[in-house]
Amino acid sequence: MRLTYDVIVVGSGFSAIAVTCNLIEQLPASATVAVVGDDPGFGRGTAYRTELYLHRLNVPAGRMSLLPHQPDDFVDWLKSHGRQLQASDFASRSDYGLYVRDTLARLLRKRDGRCRVDFIKAKAAGCVERYSSTLAFHLGNGDEIAGRNVVLCLGVGNATLPVDPDGVPASLRSRIIENPWRLSWLRRVAPSDAVCILGSGLTMIDQVLALRAHGHSGRIDVLSRRGLAPLGHAPKPPVPLPIDVRALPETLSGILKTLRAKSRTVADWRAVMDGLRPATQALWQRLSSRERARFLRHALPWWNIHRHRVAPDVFDRFEELVLDGTVRFHAGFLKSLGAEEGGLVAAYRVRAAREIAEIRADWLVNCTGMERAGISHSPLLKEMSRFELIIPDPLGLGIQVNAASEVIAPSRISPARLFAVGALTAGQFWEITAVPDIRVQAKAVAEEIVSRG
């Protein structure tokens, strides 16, 4: 069976739901939309399905409304559901997932003047230019659909373990948690068990607090290449320092020197980071390919801990565990995983040294974060690349798109328009994984589709 739609949205995470909501608001009643994805938690994604109240958003509620032209929508939703939070507060991720679901449901309940939206629970397995004006997708259920406009909203998955656990016997493999967001593993951890966490970013903090909430009181060792952890938001955010990106140097070293100098002129360095925030995409686009590569090699870890901060009270809880020695940081490169005396052994090369050290633990948890946006994680994207319907970003940051988020593929002959939203467009925009950025991009893509009819 083959159906043809005006727009096909491929994906089932936040980017897909943001695009779909904007299309519902903007398309005429005669239009048709298909949303293709096989995730049963459509729109909520991994991050927003967590039920633990300590898992908070990293952006204040006042900047998290799904539709950018309705800035108070999320705060109003919180109040209507008995959550007495202000725009400056950090809501739970679970609540945000429910809000996203409710927003889509509210738009779908509108019957008059709304475009038709079909949700197809299937995986898009292949794409071909089969028809004169469309792109056609083979679906995992055997069907085929075609679209005059297509929006790729494919996110990224969890990063794999840095090394193969070949040295771990089968009897202990269940104590290696490769996907920490499947929180059922927490129930198997004894209160006094020693835990080793790989990676020291936001996911690590989430899992440390989840362990504590489930009664764990044992030692937690954290291993990452640099031993850096995210910093916290200020309880009272400073006024952002306006930054003119056009006046910044064009080299990474020059930019860092300038930003450090500016940070010495303000009471709180966060004022500089928050002032840079609205101009980050413009700054990235000014950098040459060489300078972008230097940023990824040398500056990314420091950017992450200053830019992607945690809610103040969450940071305080975590900092207490660090100060009392419960959480211990190690900087180094994981070399191997093995077992000894019924426990796990993680051997690593100490950073800036030739010494090999070991961490012994009852559990090992992979919190190295999300894999970098690219093509290799998706069979669909790999096939589209093989047929040159998409082109990989040269730095491995998704696929090539232009300033309007339209996919660049000179060999494509179909007049059907192909867009991408979210992490796949990081090569063009860099800052495009947080809600405030994705919602603006989703609205712009919907407007571009509507403007061309």
Image (tube, grey):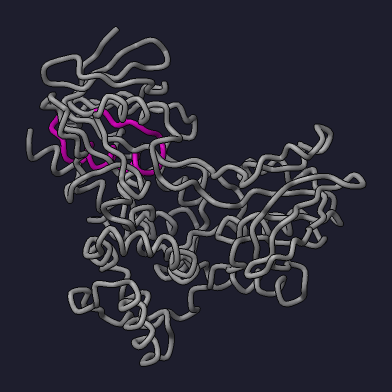
At horizontal 81% and vertical 53% (from top left) the residue drawn is 361
At horizontal 19% and vertical 35% (from top left) the residue drawn is 409
- Viewer-proximal residue among 232 and 414: 414
174 vs 192, left or right, is left
Q: Give how far across and how far down residue 274 sits, in percent.
A: 35, 74
Q: Is residue 159 magenta?
A: no
Q: Residue furthest right?
A: 341
In the rendered view of the protein, which quadrant contains the C terminus?
top left
448 vs 64, left or right, is left
Q: Give how far across and how far down residue 39 sits, in percent.
A: 47, 30
Q: Which residues are magenta?
A: 8-29
Q: Give how far across and how far down residue 95 sits, in percent.
A: 50, 51
- Viewer-proximal residue among 94 and 209: 209
- Viewer-proximal residue among 80 and 338: 338
91 vs 259, left or right, is right
**Is 331 placed above or below 145 here?**
below
**Is 141 placed above or below 193 here?**
above
At horizontal 75% and vertical 54% (from top left) the residue drawn is 347
**Is 323 placed above or below 10 here?**
below
**Is 60 placed above or below 44 here?**
below
